[in-house]
Image (cartoon, helix red, strand yellow):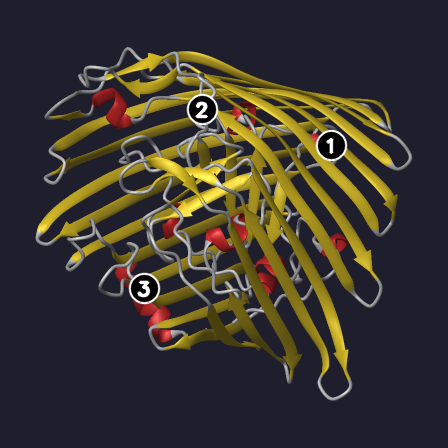
Amino acid sequence: MIFVSRLLIAIFPLLYFSSSLALEKCEWDNRKGIPCLTISKTPNSSSYNNDNVVKKVFNRQEIEALGAKDTFDVLKLVPGIDYYQSGSKGQTGAIFMRGSESNHTLVLLNGIPINDQSTTNGIHDFGQDFIQTFQQIEIYKGSNGSHFGPDAIGGAINFVTDIDYNNYYSINGFNFDNSSFDYNQTKITENEWHINFKGSTNQIKTDSAIAKGSEKDGTENYQINLNASKWIKDNLKFKSTFYGRDTKSDYDKNATTEENITSNNKMYAIQSGFERLARNSFDNFIIHYHGYDREYDEQGTVNNYYSESITSKAERDVIFNEKFSYGFGAEYKYDWGDYTTLTFNSQTKGHLKNFGVFTNVGYKFSDNQSLALHIRNDDHKETGGNQTHKINFTQSFKNFKIGLTHSTGLKNPSLYELYGSSSSHSGSTLIDPEKSKTREFYLKHNFSENFNFISTFYKTNMTDRIKIKSDWSGYENKIPDTTQKGIESEINLILKNDQRFSIKSHFAKSRTDTGANNSRRPDLSYGIDYEKKLLLESLGPININLNYRYIGDHIDWTGSKNEFVKSIDLVDLSIRKKAYGSIFSLNLNNLLNERYEKPATYSQDGRQFRIGFKKLY
């Protein structure tokens, strides 16, 4: 299938520019194919509690305006998310959401979990996710087990694929070795099938992955996304999507082993289902399959990792009356995977299954006051039944809104932690899930139509941590719990002459049970985002996006010991101009040419610029 994606991308060249039409034009039965924003519903929510779900959404228009190519281009702008990548784009990468561990974030495709079960601890490799074919990215921070099920212990990120009704192609970069190509084509057939094809490829070759390396490491990425939909009846719609990616990268094993070290990371997924909309209810049913095929070649020593997953999910949401809504559903997930590594002398093979049932209610005491309750129970093959819940109370005043939330999450042991083995230790089926509790206080004050302040105070406790035993014989649940607490804040201001200005900050403390700092998680980070439409007599309107981020001092392993690493200042600039039915762009990344390592001992790119051309047709 990856070969097919490469062939199609080679045949079809590539751009994108989405016109920001009004949200009200995004009708459920968009038979005429109006380009508009994607509307995505949070799982296990209904009409009177869906608005109480706090999430950050980046739609296609915003992703394009940023000039973003991979997930880190987007996630680095979100307060409460700390990221690291073992080199430039295409290298292994992960995130810490609100100070939780790097394997505590659940990743989903259209609401279905896609974490790779062939990884040692269930971590998702964000470094492989280039995002040109995604229509939307949604970030849910805090314990979210009642919405998404197991593994959303620190939060969740949902990648949304959808039909894009803008036909376009694009090309951008700064030389042949560092370029991107995108293509989108949508057709509505005579029998009312909506067929959409998206393709993308990225070529990257900059510095060595390790700091002070002697050679350049490169990445080749290919993506394909096929979407189809058809209205069976006026209130019944069939939807299907296929997504595939293939990322090949050079990487470095260590300071002395750099040459002929490569990785080939493939992922593919297919979903099909039905949606039905009635006057007071909404139903959806989906069947999902995905697989991972990863290969790491270390100078002739090849390690292979495989995993596959099948999921079926059904959900129903009902508006009972003008004050009360409810929903319920079920999800069944079956995972299997295996690998044998020669480098680490470890192996695992097995399968997991989980059956979850969930329900929610929303009650409006008045137009300004509501209560939401979400409950989910998951029956896992090894850990048995585990319940997660979320309760929220929201009160709105004239220009003021507050919300109180208590939520829980859990993370089941990975396939390797249950069944894996190595020369020194083996897995255990007796370990319990890790658990989390998050308490949040949310407030939003609209000083005027053009000026608002948003802040979230949170505290998360994580227990039953899965760790290696002291004698290295296997895994067990240990006492070293962690506590994360902090304040996320935003000030948003719309100025005259088409200007937007935002200040974002995150004051945090991520600590072990002894009070020590957790590594790679700074106590302070903040940023400034600025957008302006500049009017020039000779050129007309030009759109400018300027993003600044400060990442504070933090503990990291520097090669010989854990110590504080200096702070980082990053500035990105994007300039876009529409003319003659095309979009011309200039992106300057790391404008200050900050030379930094994140994590320590792994180089990140210095200043880069990309010139782009995008054409609608």
Name the residue nearer the viewer: 299 or 266: 299
Kind of residue sitting beneath label 2: Ala
The reply, left or right, for residue 281 in relation to residue 430 is right
The reply, left or right, for residue 574 in relation to residue 252 is right
Q: Secondary structure at mark 3?
A: loop
Whether 446 is drawn above or below 494: the answer is above
Q: Secondary structure at mark 1?
A: loop
Residue drawn at 55 percent across, 66 percent down: 190
Q: Secondary structure at mark 2?
A: loop
In the rendering, at what x and y percent does residue 76 appear? 53, 49
Whether 13 is drawn above or below 499: the answer is below
Residue bearing the label numbered 1: 280
In the rendering, at what x and y percent does residue 386 appear? 45, 13
| Residue 586 picture quarter | bottom right
Residue drawn at 30 percent across, 33 percent down: 117
Kind of residue sitting beneath label 1: Asn
Q: Which comes sooner in the sequence, label 1 or label 2?
A: 1
Residue bearing the label numbered 3: 207
Quadrant where the C terminus sits is: bottom right
Query: Which callout, 1 or 3, points to the residue nearer the camera?
Result: 3
Is the residue under label 2 in contact with that under label 3 (CB below 8 Å)? no
Q: Is residue 114 visible?
A: no
Kind of residue sitting beneath label 3: Asp
Residue drawn at 50 percent across, 55 percent down: 73
Whether 266 is drawn above or below 180: the answer is above
Q: Residue furthest bottom?
A: 538
Q: Is residue 74 visible?
A: yes
Q: Which comes sooner in the sequence, label 1 or label 3?
A: 3
Q: Which comes sooner in the sequence, label 3 or label 2?
A: 3
Residue bearing the label numbered 2: 516
Name the residue nearer the viewer: 456 or 595: 595
